[in-house]
């Protein structure tokens, strides 16, 4: 178990380039199973979850060639389904949430698949009903074996149909789309998730010969085709990393330039940070955050306390709420953070309270942050990273704090942030990894 030792208080300075998007990568890499032809992917982040999925694909028989530091070619010509019966498959597939998305391609191409209950953060109940109800509507038969926690699916004859999803699940939409592209006839998915990750997946599938319409909306129409061919695809910069860097710059009074941010794909993210009083300038496709000693949270037009809440895209992503929360601890003003989707994602605030932040956890979904307006710095403490985004929020808190902090269990952060300690040191942070 690795830890970070951080001595807070340094101002950061310089430029940082966001990595490729983790959650897009997990969809796109899974989609390489849909064709026996080579698929080349660029801007693949070197992070734990992505590397685990690459290892899983290799185990399944996919030929993986590394073409450069961030480019890979995947050829799924000789996929070996017998591997799904092994303990090794179970261990690897259950270690990350993204593995659930190999199921759609397996069903589409081979007519069957099985997957253990996937891992991921412990941030509340994370049901998969939407995925399986979608597969069933396409004609698959599904069983869950509670004994070995495996989902088994037989999908020898998938047929297009109308699917009204019970919720706009991101990975659920990706999985059902990947199952439907090779099904017979037309599939319509209503209440589909439309995050940039899903849009990118659909664009890549179309470039492989699929016929998907409605990309970017919550109504997707998919006309099944008989086979897909190879393609080349570049991942978007990771919008959650971009939001994390904006928050980090503000909390540490730093001037940072986030390079090549694909600002057109960030939705409400810049606006939400602006509501906290954080200034930013968009120059071409870079985001420049000037050093700011103070920032003030806006109120609503009627003067009432600001709320920042998550919502399905194009609403504000739940994956940045922990970062907004930590940034608010040093703002002037008050904000209500409302995490609607996940019920255990705000418990990490007890660590921020130990550091001196003024936060009231109203219930598992809502926390009120009363900003300190820099009148008192947070204090360094020892803490553990409970999930990927809380982990980065604690890291941001530690970088701004007085004194030394130790963050244990940083494997959670490594799941989604590429060499974060090296990259932050290059900006002037005092951070060391202790193994
Ligand atoms: C690997 C990956 O891509 N993970 C992301 C993906 O997870 P994932 O695809 O697992 O998350 P889902 O979109 O399925 O749902 C997330 C949570 O929100 C709830 N929900 C969802 C839709 C809805 O309309 N109403 C509702 O309440 C679900 O019940 C669940 O508790 O999307 C989440 C929501 O953006 C992100 O936090 C995760 O980082
Ligand atoms: C919750 C997240 O990831 P996962 O769905 O992989 O647990 C996240 O990226 O914030």
Image (tube, helix red, strand yellow):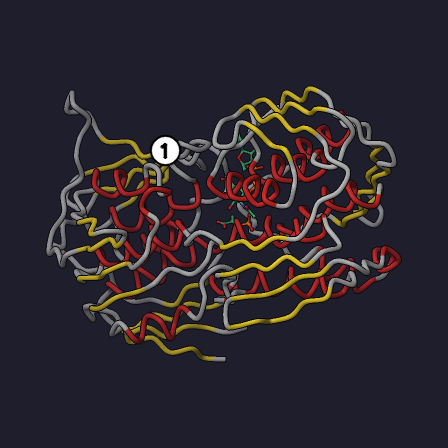
Residue at 56% of width from left, 38% of height from top? 170
Residue 49 screen position, x and y as percent: 58, 60
Residue at 50% of width from left, 72% of height from top? 69
Q: Secondary structure at mark 1?
A: strand
Residue 60 screen position, x and y as percent: 78, 60
Residue 417 screen position, x and y as percent: 45, 62
81 to the left or right of 64: right
126 to the left or right of 259: right
Q: Which residue is tagged 1?
A: 309
Q: Is residue 137 above or below residue 383?
A: above
Q: Is residue 264 above or below residue 12?
A: above
Residue 340 screen position, x and y as percent: 45, 32
101 to the left or right of 348: right
Residue at 56% of width from left, 41% of height from top? 124
Seen from the viewer's position, the closer of residues 86 and 281 is 281
Label 1 residue near ligand 1, CB within 8 Å: no
340 to the left or right of 9: right
Residue at 22% of width from left, 61% of height from top? 256
- Quarter of the picture holding the N terminus: bottom right
Q: Quadrant of residue 41?
A: bottom right
Seen from the viewer's position, the closer of residues 18 and 88 is 18
Q: Is residue 6 above or below residue 332?
A: below
The total number of labels drawn is 1
Seen from the viewer's position, the closer of residues 283 and 312 is 283
Disc 1 residue crowd, few under 14, some 14–19, many 20+, Cα 10 Å:
some
């Amino acid at each position: 178990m690795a830890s970070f030792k951080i001595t807070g208080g340094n101002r950061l300075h310089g430029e940082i380039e966001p990595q490729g998007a983790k959650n897009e990568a997990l969809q796109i890499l899974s989609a390489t199973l849909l064709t026996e032809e080579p698929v080349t992917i660029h801007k693949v982040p070197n992070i734990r979850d992505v590397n685990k999925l690459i290892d899983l694909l290799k185990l399944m028989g996919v030929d993986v060639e590394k073409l450069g530091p961030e480019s890979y070619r995947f050829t799924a010509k000789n996929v070996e389904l017998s591997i799904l019966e092994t303990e090794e498959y179970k261990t690897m597939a259950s270690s990350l949430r993204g593995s659930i998305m190999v199921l759609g391609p397996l069903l589409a191409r081979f007519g069957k698949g099985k997957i253990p209950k996937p891992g991921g953060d412990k941030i509340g109940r994370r049901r998969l009903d939407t995925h399986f109800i979608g597969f069933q509507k396409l004609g698959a038969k599904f069983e869950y074996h509670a004994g070995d926690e495996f989902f088994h699916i037989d999908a020898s004859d998938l047929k297009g149909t109308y699917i009204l999803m019970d919720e706009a699940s991101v990975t659920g939409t990706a999985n059902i789309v990947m199952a439907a592209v090779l099904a017979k006839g037309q599939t319509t998915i209503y209440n589909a998730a439309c995050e940039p990750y899903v849009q990118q997946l659909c664009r890549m599938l179309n470039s492989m010969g699929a016929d998907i319409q409605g990309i970017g909306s919550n109504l997707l129409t998919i006309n099944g085709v008989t086979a897909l061919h190879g393609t080349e695809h570049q991942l978007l910069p990771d919008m959650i990393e971009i939001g994390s860097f904006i928050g980090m710059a503000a909390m540490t009074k730093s001037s940072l330039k986030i390079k090549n941010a694909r600002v057109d794909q960030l939705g409400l993210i810049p606006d939400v940070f602006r509501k906290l009083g954080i200034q930013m300038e968009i120059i071409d496709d870079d985001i420049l955050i000037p050093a700011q000693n103070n920032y003030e949270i806006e109120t609503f037009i009627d003067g009432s306390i600001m709320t920042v809440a998550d919502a399905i895209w194009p609403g504000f992503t739940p994956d940045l709420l922990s970062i907004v929360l930590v940034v608010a601890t040093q703002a002037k003003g008050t904000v209500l953070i409302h995490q609607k989707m996940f019920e255990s994602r705000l418990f990490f605030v007890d660590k921020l309270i130990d550091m001196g932040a003024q936060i009231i956890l109203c219930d598992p979904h809502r926390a009120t942050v009363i900003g300190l307006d820099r009148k008192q710095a947070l204090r360094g403490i020892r803490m553990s990273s409970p999930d990927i985004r809380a982990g980065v929020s604690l890291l941001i808190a530690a970088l701004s704090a007085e004194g030394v902090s130790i963050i244990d269990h940083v494997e959670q952060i490594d799941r989604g942030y590429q060499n974060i300690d090296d990259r932050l040191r290059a900006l002037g942070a005092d951070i060391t990894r202790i193994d």
